[in-house]
């Protein structure tokens, strides 16, 4: 006991000029020079406090805690050093031998706000700031502000001063700028080359891209056009589809799939989707076939290939053409075969946000059939067989030279980007497995390329708003199925016609997904998803709508969320 009876100080190594307030309780610890320890602070044995540290009143610093120099600790801060403390061990009061002390480190210059709790095993990084009342559950990086329960990233700090005040961390749905930054040095010379050659429409770069992309997709021919919609339109025309014909497709797709059929004068006929893959339910196709049916147009939605073998088999047995809408599925594979080259023709979009995106619009038809190739090549350029000799009523659907050059550069990165997307998807699968949302299914026959990573959740719209409030941008692909779109009311469909399609449209929510997505961003998304699921008032009956795998049990305490 110290001389001063208002202090309890035992076996403490005290630095010079260190001042202790009344009613401190310090034992077996070490405190460096020039530090200040406030009233009612307890510091346990083996705790180490550095120089110039200020510990405010009522704080508890336990064994296992190391606080480096220049740290500020507010009032009433609690450190914890045993994950599963018990009062007794084997029926006896716990002894020191029973404690499992997990060390905690607060690095130089950090500040810990009043009434925070720091769980054991974490490191609070240099100069980091923990907001008052936070509960720190995981490592805090250097030079950041965290706050809340659990503590989350708020903003970065530069040299100890807060220089950016961007509010909660934002995770964009898509970050095209990050991709551009990573390939800028390759893109600019490619663009300059086109400028200098003045090959602004079609030209060598587009021809080379046609060869390279069709080879990548395992097709003999590629015809570059100005959009994915044009690719669909021209492939339908090349297949001879027109007024009076029917084309079987899905309603759970981007509107362009259906619009392209309507452009030809043919009638789209919808079938429902399979609820797991979200692609065409092949068991529905036969029922939709009539004497007018000319083609089947499956969509490899979100980057997941449709079940192509039965589609081809049905098509062959009825003499139908198969056109694949692969606008979202660059590099995707079905049973080891690249999509787009499985049916008679495959159509791709190079819209900027696609897995392979132009810096503007772009599209391509690929095929192994030379007749289709020649027809489409003419149709995209005013139906011209040779200059100013127009043998077909064609269109101006040509690809720009600049887009060809840019897409050639990007194609070199596509495999790496696709693998990055697939890794992100696997990580999301793990992070979200117990979150309450339904994660996407990758069908066993497929190499899904995760253009979209769509989870499913009832009360999706509220969920989306709550995620946005936490800084997580999401998308919905697609909220209204085409058969319920006002523009297609004349097709005569009504709500209830395609139950799986309509349920998916109400429940899908696309999480941030792009090759450059960081683990930190994924963690933020995952934490937000968990938090929103817990905080939204979900009725138990709704929660239980999620099918549970045998090995995947709910960890959400339903009583707690009602
Ligand atoms: C499934 C699907 N089909 C067709 C298209 C049309 O492509 P584009 O926008 O290049 O015309 C898209 C693109 O958004 C799409 O996602």
Image (tube, rainbow, N blue to C red):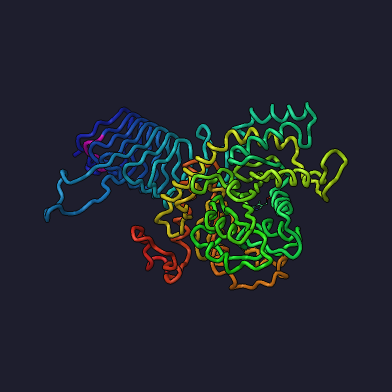
Is most of the magenta stretch helix, strand or loop? Answer: strand
Residue nearer the viewer, 482 or 98: 482
Residue 211 placement, left or right of 307: right
On the image, the x and y values in percent for residue 217 come to 59, 41
> Does 533 sit left or right of 223 as displayed?
left
Apparent side of residue 22 relative to residue 325 in the rendered image (left or right): left
In the visual, does 157 lie left or right of 43? Answer: right
Q: Where is residue 119 drawn, in percent x and y?
A: 34, 46
Magenta stretch: residue 271 in it? no
Note whether 543 is above or below 306 in the view shown.
below
Q: Quadrant of residue 208?
A: top right
**In the depicted structure, whether residue 340 falls above or below residue 534:** above
Q: Position of residue 65 (x, y in %)?
A: 30, 39
On the question of residue 101 being in view, the answer is yes
Q: Quadrant of the C terminus?
A: bottom left
The residue lying at 20 percent from left, 34 percent from top is 11
Within the image, what quadrant is residue 253 found in?
A: bottom right
Residue drawn at (87%, 42%) of the image: 389
Depth order, front residue of 512/414: 414
Task: Report if residue 471 is visible in the image.
Answer: no
Towards the viewer: 276 or 127:
276
Location of residue 299 (image quadrant): bottom right
Quadrant for the N terminus in the image = top left
| Residue at horizontal 82 percent and vertical 49 percent from the top | 392
Q: Is residue 562 above or below residue 74?
A: below
- Total number of numbered discs in the rendering: 0
Residue 166: percent from left, percent from top? 58, 44
Magenta extent:
25-29
């Amino acid at each position: 006991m110290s001389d001063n009876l208002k202090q309890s100080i035992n076996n403490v190594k005290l630095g010079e000029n260190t001042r202790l307030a009344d009613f401190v309780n310090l034992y077996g610890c070490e405190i460096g020079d020039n530090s200040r320890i406030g009233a009612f602070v307890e510091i346990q044995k083996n705790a180490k406090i550095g120089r110039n540290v200020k510990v405010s009143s009522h704080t508890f610093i336990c064994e296992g805690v190391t606080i480096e120099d220049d740290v500020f600790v507010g009032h009433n801060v609690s450190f914890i050093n045993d994950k599963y403390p018990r009062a007794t061990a084997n029926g006896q009061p716990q002894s020191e031998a029973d404690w499992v002390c997990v060390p905690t480190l607060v690095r130089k210059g950090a500040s810990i706000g009043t009434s925070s709790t720091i769980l054991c095993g974490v490191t609070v990084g240099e100069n980091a700031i923990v907001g008052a009342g936070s509960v720190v559950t995981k490592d805090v990086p250097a030079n950041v502000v965290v706050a809340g329960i659990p503590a989350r990233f708020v903003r970065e700090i530069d040299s100890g001063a807060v220089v950016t005040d961007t509010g909660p961390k934002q995770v964009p749905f898509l970050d095209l700028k990050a991709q551009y930054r990573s390939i800028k040095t390759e893109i600019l010379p490619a663009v300059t080359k086109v400028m200098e050659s003045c090959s602004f429409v079609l030209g060598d770069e587009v021809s080379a891209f046609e060869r390279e992309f069709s080879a990548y997709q395992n097709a003999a021919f590629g015809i570059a056009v100005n959009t994915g919609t044009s690719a669909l339109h021209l492939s339908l025309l090349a297949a001879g589809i027109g007024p009076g014909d029917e084309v079987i497709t899905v309603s759970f797709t981007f509107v362009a799939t259906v619009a392209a059929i309507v452009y030809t004068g043919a009638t789209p006929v919808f079938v429902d989707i399979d609820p797991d893959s979200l692609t065409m339910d092949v068991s529905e196709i036969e029922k939709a076939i009539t004497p007018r049916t000319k083609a089947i147009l499956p969509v490899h939605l979100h980057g997941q290939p449709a079940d192509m073998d039965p589609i081809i088999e049905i098509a062959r047995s009825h003499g139908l053409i198969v056109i694949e809408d692969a606008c979202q599925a660059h590099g995707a594979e079905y049973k080891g075969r690249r999509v787009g080259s499985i049916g008679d023709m495959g159509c791709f979009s190079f819209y900027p946000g696609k897995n392979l995106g132009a810096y503007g619009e772009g599209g391509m038809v690929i095929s192994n059939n030379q007749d289709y190739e020649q027809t489409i090549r003419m149709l995209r350029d005013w139906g011209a067989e040779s200059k100013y000799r127009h043998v077909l009523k064609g269109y101006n659907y040509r690809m720009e030279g600049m887009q060809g050059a840019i897409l050639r550069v990007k194609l070199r990165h596509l495999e790496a980007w696709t693998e990055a997307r697939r890794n992100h998807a696997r990580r999301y699968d793990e992070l979200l497995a117990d979150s309450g949302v339904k994660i996407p299914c990758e069908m066993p026959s497929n190499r899904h390329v995760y253009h979209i990573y769509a989870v499913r959740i009832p009360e999706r719209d509220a969920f989306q708003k709550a995620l946005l409030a936490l800084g997580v941008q999401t998308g919905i692909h697609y909220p209204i199925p085409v058969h319920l779109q006002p523009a297609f009311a004349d097709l005569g469909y009504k709500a209830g016609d395609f139950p799986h399609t309509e349920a998916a449209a109400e429940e899908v929510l696309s999480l941030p997904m792009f090759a450059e997505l960081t683990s930190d961003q994924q963690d933020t998304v995952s934490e937000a998803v968990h938090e929103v699921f817990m905080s939204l008032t979900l009725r138990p009956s709704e929660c239980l709508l999620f099918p549970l795998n045998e090995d995947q049990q709910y960890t959400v305490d339903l009583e707690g969320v009602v």
